[in-house]
C-alpha cells in the first residue's frame, strides 16, 4: 500500500483525536538527555522556538514531492514534538494542560453548533 493511501486510511479510521498527556517520564528523559550533554545553556526560549520551526519545515519537506516515507515523517514529527517539550520544560508549562486550555479557547471561538463542515468564527 502506498504511504499516502496508508495516511488516508489512518485518518479515516479515527473518529476523534487522541490527546496525549505527555508523561513525566518522557519529559524527565528529555531533561536528562540535555543535562548529560551540557546543552541547557543553548536551550533559550528563542533558540527552541527557532528549532521548532526548522524541524516543522523538515516535517513538511517529507510531503513535498509525492508519497511520504512514513519512517521519515515519524522521525521529523518526533523532532518537532521533542523541541516543543523542551520549550514547555524551559517555560515550566504543562504540555497537556496548555493544549486543553487552548482547546477550550478554540471551542469558544468555533462553537460546534455553528459548524457544518466549514469554519465559522464566533466573533
Image (tube, rainbow, N blue to C red):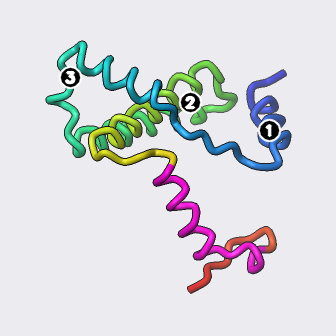
Hey, which quadrant is residue 83 in on the image?
top left
Q: Residue 57, percent across and down? A: 44, 38
Where's the C terminus, which quadrant? bottom right
Q: Which residues are magenta?
A: 97-115
Q: Which residue is mark 3?
A: 39
Where's the N terminus, which quadrant? top right
In the image, farthest residue toward the left: 41
Give the residue at x 32% y 17%.
Answer: 33
Give the residue at x 79% y 38%.
Answer: 8
In the image, farthest residue toward the front: 24
- Contact? badges 2 and 1 (CB < 8 Å): no
Per the image, label 3 sits on a secondary structure element best described as: loop
* SS assignment for the magenta stretch, majority: helix
Q: Please count the marks in the image.
A: 3
Per the image, label 1 sits on a secondary structure element best described as: helix
Disc number at residue 8?
Answer: 1
Hey, which quadrant is residue 64 in on the image?
top right
Q: Is residue 31 above or below residue 50?
A: above
Amino acid at each position: 500500500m502506498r504511504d499516502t493511501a496508508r495516511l488516508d486510511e489512518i485518518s479515516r479510521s479515527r473518529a476523534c483525536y487522541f490527546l496525549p498527556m505527555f508523561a513525566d517520564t518522557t519529559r524527565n528523559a528529555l531533561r536528562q538527555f540535555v543535562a548529560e550533554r551540557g546543552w541547557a545553556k543553548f536551550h533559550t526560549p528563542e533558540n527552541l522556538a527557532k528549532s521548532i520551526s526548522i524541524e516543522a519545515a523538515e516535517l513538511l519537506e517529507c510531503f513535498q514531492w509525492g508519497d511520504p516515507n512514513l519512517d521519515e515523517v515519524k522521525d521529523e514529527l518526533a523532532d518537532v514534538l521533542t523541541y516543543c517539550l523542551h520549550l514547555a520544560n524551559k517555560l515550566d508549562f504543562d504540555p497537556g494542560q496548555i493544549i486543553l486550555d487552548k482547546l477550550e479557547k478554540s471551542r469558544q471561538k468555533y462553537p460546534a453548533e455553528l459548524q457544518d463542515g466549514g469554519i465559522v468564527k464566533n466573533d
